[in-house]
Amino acid sequence: MTNQRADYDNPWKEAISLYFQPFMAFLFPEIEENIDWDKGYEFLDKEFQQIARDGEISTREADKLVKVWRSDGQETWVLIHVEVQSQYESVFAERIYVYNYRIFDKYRRQVVSLAVLADESKSWRPNEYSYTIWGCEVLLRFPIVKLLDYSSQVLEESNNPFAVIVAAHLANQQTKQNVQQRYQIKLRVAKRLYQRGYGRQDILELFRLIDWLISLPDSWQTGFTEEIISYE
């Protein structure tokens, strides 16, 4: 894994762990509505790592396997893939297919694969893996969300904590070559935490994730910290 990918993957991994239900509600609302949250959910890190060790297609730090219960009481496993760099479509889709069938093969659980496309290519939108040979067809079609589709207005107006994560991620991509703009956007995203009515713990967690996603040179970071302290 490259350092660049790790820098993206790690905050996403932690954000999903901290805010799984808001993640589902913001990015996959129709699925979130069909989950019985009263029964809780469970991250299956041990099970997923076992599958990853057995596989030849590498996993990502941000990939998560979660056990949930549907509204009808049935147990379902949700496999989340976060991809921050567009690849050849077949490579990404194949990875999703391989993990889906390997989880089913090993644990005999129904698996729903979801893909978050967090890359910078507007046209890259793989949503299925398939092949056909001699009348035999294999097909896995999976829901995707493209972060570039979210407008700044939608992100600003939403009180969902994951809207903050998406806004910070997009801001990081959009301001790589402009430190002044990067500073101003990071400041705006951070200040919005205090305007959305979040509790103290959520503000601290989200602030830490924003700081992780939108890095600044030391001199700019010092000014940013001072301005936030003054704003508080």
Image (cartoon, grey):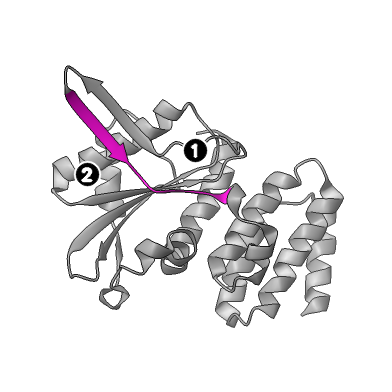
Q: Upstream in the sequence, badge 2 or badge 1?
A: 2
Q: Which mark is residue 125?
A: 1
Q: Amino acid at mark 1?
A: Arg
* Magenta residues (range): 136-147
Question: Which is the main secondary structure of the residues drawn in magenta?
Answer: strand
Residue 13 percent across, percent down from the top left? 47, 53
Q: How many marks?
A: 2
Task: Kindly identify the residue that appears in the image at 74 percent across and 72 percent down.
Answer: 191
Task: Kindly identify the residue that appears in the image at 44 percent across and 45 percent down.
Answer: 61
Q: Secondary structure at mark 2?
A: helix
**Residue furthest out toward the top:** 134
Q: Does the magenta segment cover residue 214?
A: no
Mark yes or no: residue 27 visible.
Answer: yes
Residue 208 percent across, percent down from the top left? 62, 64
Residue holding disc 2: 103
Q: Amino acid at mark 2?
A: Ile
Q: Secondary structure at mark 1?
A: loop
Residue 118 percent across, percent down from the top left? 55, 45
As drawn, 39 above or below 170: below
**Residue furthest out toward the front:** 135
Task: Kindly identify the residue that appears in the image at 52 percent across and 46 percent down.
Answer: 9
Quadrant into which the C terminus falls: bottom right
Crowd class of label 1 (few under 14; some 14 to 19; many from 20; radius 10 Å): some
Determine the image quadrant of residue 54.
Answer: top left
Task: Kindly identify the residue that appears in the image at 85 percent across and 62 percent down.
Answer: 223
As drawn, 142 above or below 94: below
Residue 227 percent across, percent down from the top left? 83, 70
As drawn, 139 above or below 228: above
Q: Which mark is residue 64?
A: none
